[in-house]
Image (cartoon, rainbow, N blue to C red):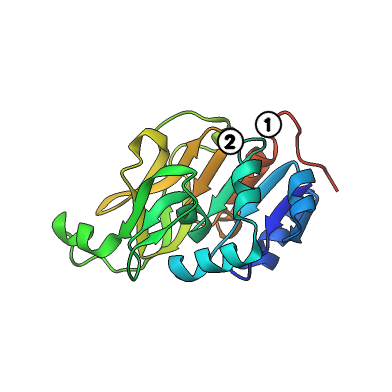
Amino acid sequence: MIAIVDYGVGNLASLAGSLASLGLANEVTRDPARLSSASHILLPGVGAFGDAMQKLRDTGLVPVLKSQAQKKPLLGICLGMQLLFEKSYEFGEHQGLGLLPGEVCPLGPDLAAAGHPELKVPHMGWNRLDILRADPFFANTRPGEYVYYVHSFYAKRCEADTLATSPYGAAVTGVVRRGLVYGTQFHPEKSGSAGLRMLAAFAALGGQPAERL
């Protein structure tokens, strides 16, 4: 069973529906026991980093997630990926889960510094995914496939753990991994066939494949 973390942030129904369409058993939960018994964990998220991190703390699940991330595959999606890092500079400075080294920074200033002030923020819509390192997460992914982004901040100083980027004036961090911890800045559940195939590959990771419906 794939556990989808419910902490009041994120389009949980869309993600659950995508997994169900793949025949993958899943459950939206904030029960530590269910997270501990799951084969895989998904951490979704939309909105502002500081608010989301506070809501996650309020559930009491931070120690559970940090512990389970050492035992089974965990995938952070969009803001959920950003929460995996050490800190964010979105509306101040906020501490993250610290499961990945790096920082979440505003995209706009970097686009201007790279000579692309005309590019809009948020970075929203379809963009090409450039795979930098082979990984089982890309077992079903073809080179140059397009995925769907909606974000104004992105992960930096995480090159050692970056598996893929997308071009948008700068190289936007698209997929990261350290150990069993994965993250996608884009929404795989909104990325059509390409995104579904990545979710299927994630479900196949680890010693205990995700349960089928």
Circle 2 residue:
180
Q: Residue at x 21, y 62 (%)?
A: 109
Q: As displayed, is residue 186 above or below residue 142?
A: below
**Label 1: few (<14), some or many (≥20) within 10 Å?**
some
The reply to whether residue 84 is visible in this rendering is yes
Which residue is drawn at the image coordinates 36% and 61% (left, top)?
Answer: 153
Residue 84 in picture, x, y percent from top left: 49, 50
Residue 115 in view of the camera: no
The total of numbered circles placed on residues is: 2
In the rendered image, residue 161, in percent from the top left (x then y), is placed at: 41, 36
Residue displayed at 74% across by 61% down: 28
Answer whether labels 1 and 2 touch (C-beta < 8 Å). yes
User: What's the residue at 68%, 31% (across, down)?
Assistant: 206
Q: Callout 2 environment at 10 Å: few (<14), some (14 to 19), or many (20+)?
A: some
Under mark 2, the amino acid is Leu
- Amino acid at pointer 1: Gly
Q: Nearer the viewer, residue 101 or 27?
A: 101
Query: SS at mark 1?
Result: loop
Considering every residue shown, the one lying at the far right of the view is 213
